[in-house]
Image (tube, rainbow, N blue to C red):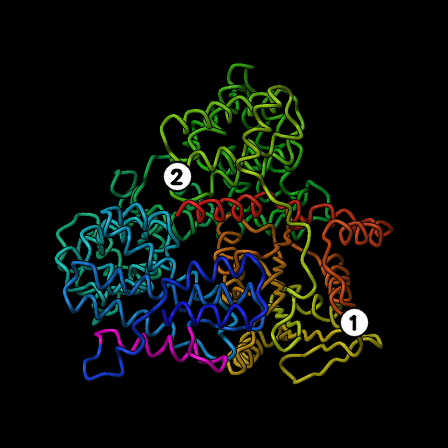
Amino acid sequence: MGRIKNLLRVILTRPLTGMAILVFITQGLFARTDSTANKGFFKKPDYYVDDEQDRIDGMDGAVDGWVDLGDSVESVFATKTYINLVDSIQTAVDQSSFDEVTKKAYRDIVYLQIHKVNFNSVYNIKRFYSFLKFLNGELNAIKQNRLYSYLVKSNILQAFRIVSVIKNEPCADSFFIYAAHYRPDLVFRNYELYSSKPWALHVLEETSKIAPVTVKRYFNPKDPIFLALKTSNDTVIKLIIAIKEKYARRSNAFTLIDGIMHGDYTMDQADAIGSDPKRFFQAMIKIRSRKNPLGEHSLEEDMAVYALKFVRVLNDLHNDRDEVRFASIEKFSAEELYSMMVYSEEEIFTSSFNGLFDRMMIKLGPVSGFDFLKQVGDNRFRTFIKMCAGYGKLKTFLQSMTPVYQQMLMIKFASGLEQYNDLSQAVEVADAFGSITDSLVLKILKGAIKYEYIKQSAAGNERGKIIYGLLSSLFVDRSISNQNWFASVSNQYAIPSFDHIANDKLFNRDSIDRWLIFFYDDEDGESSYSTFIQAFTDPNWAIADSGIYVIIKSKKGKQVNIYANKPKHEYDGQEKIESIFNIYDYEPNVMVHRGHSYYAYKTIEKVKDNTQIFVLGSCGGYHSISSIIERSPEVSIISSKQIGTRYVNNPMLKLLAENIRKGQDVEWQSLWANLDKSLEKNREAYERFLDYIPPHKNLGAIFIKTYNKLMEDQD
């Protein structure tokens, strides 16, 4: 009864909405009723978790089961997270069959997480909710004997945060090997935590076969991973060790282990091939055309590196005649030209793609595009089709094959997307959709997606239903027939509008909107930086120069603080800004990556859950976009089909900053229209601007965000 009286007191004395009252009563009745248990002689095993909850609960001046943040909706969310969700985890641990050591491990994980909650971070509820919800789901999955399926559909980064307890589960080795295909670095980095397990060597062996270039970083005489692998009797591992013993870590033969094992060349020949960029690229293409080759992760990374090396030469010569610009690749085969295109997606210029595509089609001769894709093992064929659609070349490519093959290819393009463990292939289809205008192709896609949705529904595959339900929603306004069917599905899997950000969402608790801009010391970093500074040289802004970084502050209107390192101070400038943000617990509301795609991961790692806008300096492939969204589920992403240019970036950033400074909501459609109007007189800038993708038209990002929300609702 005391609990009910306390709830009534809170309701009567605090301004809550009707929905907030309902949620609070529902959750509050089941909140902790045993807070006094810790005060007696006997202490609960998890008393220290309860103490942390009481500390958080008391931040508003009263330990009453209600975390008051001054806003009824946020207060309900905070109470749900810090009180009810933690209670749920505690109950699951108490009622589990874990031994006391494992129970203690779970309690420590929860304690260490909520111990981070202070008077500043208590408002960053999403950060804590995301992890605690994952942990609660993991415990329920163990209880229901479905842990492996839960982990593989979850955020791998989240899973590795609790590796100390996951390692004790029967499916741990299978999950680590699964994770190795995406994040082998995490499997190696956490080896010490599972090294005593009987399956530890097997996990190291399989991960090394997937990522031989990653494992060679651990090839030091006394490194535990190296010492463990030296005891392996696996033939492939013995080969990897032999390459290290003979050529140290510099050799590219590590990437070519599949070719060596297939007898295509010896270890010595592989080392020689690896020292010649063109031969190395050719060898990787041949291996990659095989199904599930050894070293797949390293192949993917190195093929991207070498494709970009060739493509950047073409990009840099974009003002030269074609005879000069494309001279370096005129002798490349169709397979090489294809690989250059699909592996340089994040940086290739429109003109570079068109030049490579035209030359590839000539090299194909009488071979149909359908047969050609089979020759390359269908490697990244969805990426290629998406790029062809985006650059207006899809019709040309399809005309290289018979109508039957055209239909077969587009059906294959849209089918089987639920079989992949991540959303990368589904996102390729979603991205392509926005660029496809051919009515026949749309009709084929529409039929394939409808068929797949019905198939997933019949099989009871909820994930597959969501994927194809969302793709079906894209057809509502463009459906050639069966409009009613697509409209019906769209009602269940509606894709929300991401055209609007309320102005107050862009400010921290101290009413300051903070930007974090990272410049990199590459060929155009200095010129990009200098023109960026010029854009903010006006009476509304003040620039404070620290020597290695600057802070640009608004002098009128709402407070906007823009932190940017100088390009020549890529390392120390960025490090200093990061230290400022860490010391004062600042979170960037707007982040901008001003550099090539291979630097992007450094910027993405700094994204926080309160980051509302991320400007990516290139098109941003699936992994870049999904990594940003993992860190901030509601983020709006601006990207480009090719490398960003200062002629667009600077006007865009200035317009956005002025919008926020004036206290206006960000309306992407109108902001984009204003930017379009301001750039239309500059032909070069305007042509590059047309390759930029605003948040409300970024179908890949919209697809991921909507999918994540729908999957979360299923839990």
Find numbered disc 1 in the image and state the secondary structure of the residue it sits on: helix
**In the rendered view, does 346 fall on the left or right side of 107?**
right
**In the rendered view, does 570 fall on the left or right side of 190?**
right
Q: 171 above or below 512?
A: above
Identify which amino acid the numbered label 2 is placed on: Tyr
Query: 388 or 711, which is in the foreground?
Result: 711
**In the rendered view, does 33 fall on the left or right side of 659?**
left
Please say whether residue 242 is one of the residues in the magenta stretch: no
The spot of residue 568 in percent (x, y) is 61, 75
- Which residues are the magenta region? 44-64
Query: 369 or 714, which is in the foreground?
Result: 714
Q: Residue 390 occupies which quadrant of the picture?
A: top right
Single out the mark in the foreground, 1 or 2. 2
Q: At x 71% / y 83%, what residue is drawn?
A: 544
Q: 273 above or below 62?
A: above
Identify which amino acid the numbered label 1 is placed on: Gln
Q: Main secondary structure of the magenta part?
A: helix
Q: Residue furthest right?
A: 681
Query: 664 or 62, which is in the foreground?
Result: 62
Inspect this view and state whether residue 684 appears: no
Res 420 label: 2
Query: 480 or 216, which is in the foreground?
Result: 480
The spot of residue 66 in percent (x, y) is 46, 71
The spot of residue 369 in percent (x, y) is 52, 24
Query: To which residue does mark 1 refer?
Result: 534
Inspect this view and state whether residue 442 appears: yes
The spot of residue 268 in percent (x, y) is 28, 50
Q: At x 50% / y 71%, what residue is drawn?
A: 10
Bin the neighbour count of mark 2 within 10 Å (Cα to Cα): few under 14, some 14-19, many 20 and up: few
